[in-house]
Amino acid sequence: MHGYYGTYLTVVVLFAIGAAIVGGAFLANRALRPHRPTPEKLTTYECGVDPVGEGWAQSYVRYYVFAYLYVVFAVDAVFLFPWATVFSAKGYGYVTLGEMFVFLAFIAAGLAYAWKKGVLGWV
Amino acid sequence: MSTERIVGVGAGTKDLATEDMTLNIGPQHPSTHGVLRLRITLDGERITAAEPIIGYMHRGAEKLFEVRDYRQIIVLANRHDWLSAFASELGVVLAVERMLGMEVPVRAVWARTLLAELNRVLNHLMFLGSYPLEVGAITPIFYSFREREQVQRVMEEISGGRLHYMFNRVGGLKEELPAGWLGRVTDAVAAVRHGVGDIDRLIRGNEIFRARTRGVGVLTREQIEQYGVSGPIARASGVDFDLRRDEPYLAYGELQDVLRVVTRTEGDCLARFECLLDQVHASLDLADACVARLKELPPGPINVRLPKVLKVPEGHTYAWTENPLGINGYYLVSHGEKTPWRLKLRSASFNNIQVLREMLPGHLVADMIAILGSMFFVVGDIDK
Amino acid sequence: MSETHVLAEGATLNSFGHDPWWIIGLKALVVFVFLLLTVLITVWAERRIIGRMQLRPGPNRAGPFGILQALFDGIKGALKEDIVPRGVDKVVFFLAPILAAAPAMVSFSVIPWGGVVSIGGHKTPLQLADLPVAVLLPLAMASIGVYGFVLAGWSSMSPYALLGGLRSSAQVISYEIAMGLSFVAVFLFSGTLSTSEIVAAQAHGTAFKVAGMTLHTPSWYAVLLLPSFIIYIFTMMGESGRIPFDLPEGEGELVAGYHTEYSSLKFMMFYLAEYVNMTTLSALCTTLFLGGYRAPWPITWFWSGANSGWWPVLWFLIKIWMFTFFFIWLRAALPRVRYDQLMKLGWKVLIPVSLGWILFVSVVRALRNEHHDVGPIMIVAAIIVVLLLIASFLWERVSASEAQPEEAEAAAEQDPMAGGFPVPPLDAPHYHGVGNGRAPNSAEATRA
């Protein structure tokens, strides 16, 4: 319970309570709810038309570009956080600032590249 | 989907055979106001093809007309477009009166004009509320219904109905106007004129609303002429055609100085919305003018006595009116019976909706909703 | 950071990790109960407030003022028949709602809702857990929550659900970057990622000298770092997936988006996730920008005890409810943006502006550390910002007016009433219809 990992342990406790509540809710739900399936109920919603095929079609999903960009930017943003916390402490001066400017320039270049390629717009 | 756009991130995607996704919008879908079905082919979220599939609500109105006498037809005729009931009744009685060569009392003519304009206000208010709802603004519809209620009250008082008024008769109106009713109409009109301002301020100037509707779903003059699109939708594209002015019926001939035909040139969703909004004001002005005139008119009959069996002489005629949603026409062919031999109905929404096939491709799914909402249709009016 | 030790009642990182297990359990339970209760009250409040804004009473039958409505709706919803369509991937279909709801709850564990109080003789901070990287937890949890939406859409085997799931994932991850960037300026000033210490750092503004006068910067980062605050507000709306950014479930186009196929308790989980997210995002904003649980400035001025004991919980709740009201208000007032507009705002406005703002803040901070006079820089920066605003405004005006005209003239050269009936032009080039017979001469058509 003590020390550095103690705080993580509390998060685990929270998880455990959450799991218990969710599990209990699902059990109660299972015990109490009615269950009368009919074939019509079990079809997928297609605006009142009988679904044709599997509901899945191989289609060109444009969103994946955003997933890539997210990976790039989210990782970069995480690097910014520790820098931001120590930045104002003693012993870090213009050099630290300059370093981060270089880093941000790389991110900005990446964004500008994606922008130029048109992937930020809607395809 | 040009190679240029996906270079560097989409290498190889071209080799994968990607099927287009087919999406059914309707018949049971929240944004089709009933049972219109659109079969849409999507490439990503862009529409490549759209096909309106109609007929889910077909009630055989035209066939039913043929086995009803002329009094009964009015009941059916006000049902295909349930938001323009009065205006639809009007077309039938105008056609029959013309065939009979009947002179309608002047008070009836003015009262009909007044009621037609109030009906137009009701109809437009409905769409002024529902269209913002389509694009996600949930509040304006309550304001529009508040205003509708004002008009609805006077309509209910005179006809007993809130949707299907059934107040037209061949040769005039069903009953005399109630005492003091005209004053209450004036009050209602004033209240609506004030209240429409709320809707106007709530939604017209909204940045998000403008961004979603401006330049979206542009309808060209050619498309309108080819598909026979009419009403506020056509006028929003600069097709300045309004039967009230161009072929006056009822008392519109004498109202030319009050009648203002609202037009826009952009032809996009925003223009259609603004057309509707301004048309409400124009209609309210007309209603005021009608009330003023009705008050001046000397007392007199409001309908003519009809024979027990109403037979229309042999012949044919086409009576069309400027319904709230566009041109509504009845082509009446009579063989001298007490029922029509054929009564062809030309409804506004039927034509207006066909143009979707040309409008939708190239737009995003989200735009489809904005466009569909701005086409102001009533499913009953499409399927008849 | 230096001033944190003065605040006897404020919590710091050191205050954590000394609690007995029962206090930890109690606090965890309180977090859950608080969140669930808040959801119930928020749902009720939302319906009442929106009802007011829409000229109708809202729910007013169940309990006093209808306050039990949300509870009853929740119970009823959870006891509905659970329909699992035939085609779905059953395991994923079951896991997705849990995956959506659980992270939203966990995020709240790092939010401080009060200072140090005494419970059963133990001094303990009113915060479940604080980590040296606490602020990362909500960000990480938001990313995990995305899986819930994506998998729900994917496992439903329905095009609406699939598109809805993809949309929501793209939306949340796009806005999360801007959200992360909006935090950086806060870290620059607070020097820590721990939530309790960020709250402590907002207790007093730092002093600096401008033109010989000693001025205290405002203590709330919402004032000091206004651009960050505004960016956070935008991303908060985007992350929560509510109007105007509720595209994943935009009922108009995608029916109900990723939860189209869900029913019963599983649907309630998504519903719960949305409202818990709203609360968590409001709480995070309160913590980072509005001084957390600490009393607002005018109160501390005349009442020194405002920050001691259990009072901070009150301030915290007031601040959270301000944001919740803001969410509700927006929902009543605004339409929904379109997908590409949302992405454009996220990637082309919020992220670049955040990056520029970080640069500016860090430069100012560095100069101040080196004891330079930052006054002139501030003035120059203000002038530049104003100029940029004017330029962008003018540019928009110009581009808008350029786009305006064009087809203003398409004069009515054709008589639409030829022959007494409307006649379409018969051979216009772009008619794409099926090759059906055109309307015959209207004059003949009249002779039926």
Image (tube, coloured by chain):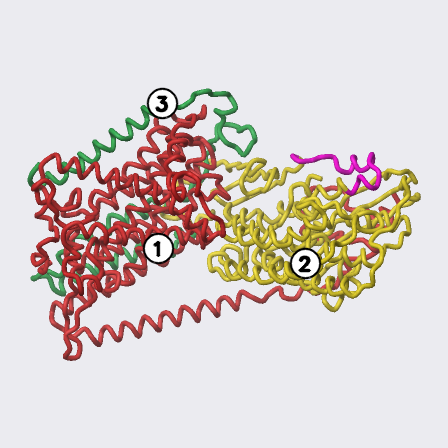
Chain colours: A green, B yellow, C red
Is residue C235 shown above or below A31?
A: below
At which x and y percent is residue C172?
34, 46
Residue position for label 3: A30
Magenta span of residues: B56-74
From the viewer's perspective, is the residue at label 2 or at label 3 nearer? 2
Q: Nearer the viewer, residue C425 or C361?
A: C361
As measured in the structure, the alpha-carbon distance from the residue carrying label 2 to the one carrying label 1 is 46 Å
- Give the left or right position of residue B72, taking residue C147 as reference: right
CB under 8 Å between callouts 2 and 1?
no
- Give the left or right position of residue C441, taking residue B184 as reference: right
As measured in the structure, the alpha-carbon distance from the residue carrying label 1 to the one carrying label 3 is 40 Å
**Residue that protrudes farthest toward the front in the picture:** B179
Q: Amino acid at mark 1?
A: Phe
Is residue B259 shown above or below C168?
A: below
Q: Quadrant of the C terminus of chain C?
A: top right
* Residue C22 on the magenta span: no
From the viewer's perspective, is the residue at label 1 or at label 3 nearer? 3
Numbered marks: total: 3
Residue position for label 2: B185
Q: Amino acid at mark 3?
A: Arg
Q: Which mark is residue A81?
A: none
Residue position for label 1: C234
Q: Amino acid at mark 2?
A: Val
